[in-house]
């Protein structure tokens, strides 16, 4: 072994065992260096959403589930209970106003017809909640509408059953001398069938039945027809102590002391 090798080995074995601390580089924030990554972030998020499993993405409720819920709401009796609760509140209002009215006061009750005074549930179910205005409709041997069952044809059959708590309320209002006015989005050519239906299920005599004209300007909302009619009723000297309907558009526009909204998650009329 040469002297040079011996010297190198000696140097290696004599190396101290103490560890030198690691030299820490100071952390510095360099925004300019990160900017390209920041610019990529939206694309990364979009890609992640795209690759996300379908079950985790937000999407509208499945129509089949919604129709199951609506059917359960009706068939469980919850719908009937809520109808009765609202009509009971309206009845209390009517009875209070009748008991406290000045002699000779002309009190009025305004009722919508569909899903307020009569139920189209048989038609709704036959059509799977779809609105089919012009399809034919026939009743089967049990009195149920065939499928499909056109809405206009169904109205013409005058076969809609009563909304029972509204019928009871109307009978009580009549006993108290409160005049009954029907205001409906149905059209004038349906008057005879509508009157037949109302009488058939037992509604007491009404003061007037207002239907939309068969020909007229297109209205953005049913309220554009109904509110002016209520103003006409008031112009006859009546105080509308209660206005009851299943659509918001039955109730907006004023001209009633109190409004009562019945449930109807099955369809909407603007
Ligand atoms: Mg209605």
Image (cartoon, grey):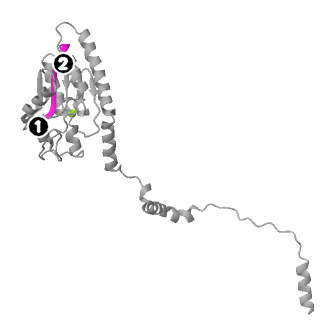
State which region is magenta.
175-186
Q: Distance between the residues labelled 1 and 2?
A: 29 Å
Image position, residue 143 (x, y; %)? 16, 38
Q: Is mark 2 within 8 Å of ligand 1?
A: no
Residue shown at 32%/45% (left/top)? 68
Q: Let me know if residue 131 appears in the view.
A: yes
Name the image quarter holding the C terminus. Answer: top left
Determine the image quadrant of residue 230: top left
> What residue is shown with label 2?
108
Contact, mark 1 vs mark 2 (Cβ under 8 Å): no
The quadrant where ligand 1 appears is top left
| Residue ranking furthest to the top | 103
Q: Which of 149 and 222 is in front in this view?
A: 149
Q: Which of 154 and 179 is in front in this view?
A: 154
Which secondary structure, mark 1? helix
Image position, residue 122 (x, y; %)? 21, 39
Q: Count neighbours of disc 2 (C-alpha within 10 A) and say few if under 14, some if 14 to 19, many if 20 or more.
A: many
Image position, residue 86 (x, y; %)? 30, 26
Q: Let me know if residue 255 appears in the view.
A: no
> What residue is shown with label 1?
157
Q: Is the magenta stretch mostly helix, strand or loop?
A: strand
């Amino acid at each position: 072994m040469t002297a040079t090798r011996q010297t190198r080995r000696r140097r290696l074995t004599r190396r101290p065992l103490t560890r030198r601390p690691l030299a820490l580089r100071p952390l510095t924030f360099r925004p300019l260096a990160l900017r390209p990554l920041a610019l990529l972030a939206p694309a990364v998020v979009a890609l992640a959403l795209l690759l996300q499993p379908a079950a985790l993405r937000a999407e509208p409720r499945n129509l089949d589930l919604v129709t199951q819920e609506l059917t359960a709401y009706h068939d469980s009796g919850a719908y009937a209970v809520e109808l009765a609760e609202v009509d009971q509140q309206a009845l209390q209002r009517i009875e209070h106003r009748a008991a406290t009215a000045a002699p000779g006061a002309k009190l009025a009750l305004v009722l919508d017809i569909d899903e307020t005074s009569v139920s189209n549930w048989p038609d709704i179910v036959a059509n799977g909640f779809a609105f089919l205005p012009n399809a034919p409709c026939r009743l089967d041997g049990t009195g149920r509408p065939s499928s499909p069952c056109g809405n206009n044809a169904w109205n013409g059959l005058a076969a809609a059953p009563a909304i029972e708590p509204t019928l009871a309320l109307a009978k009580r209002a009549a006993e108290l001398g409160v005049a009954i006015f029907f205001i409906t989005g149905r059209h004038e050519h349906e008057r005879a069938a509508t009157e037949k239906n109302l009488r058939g299920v037992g509604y007491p005599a009404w003061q007037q039945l207002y239907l939309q004209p068969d020909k007229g300007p297109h209205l953005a909302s049913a309220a554009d027809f109904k509110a002016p009619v209520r103003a006409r009723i008031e112009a006859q000297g009546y105080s509308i102590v209660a206005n009851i309907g299943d659509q918001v558009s039955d109730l907006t526009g004023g001209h009633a002391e109190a409004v009562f909204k019945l449930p109807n998650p099955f369809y909407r009329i603007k």
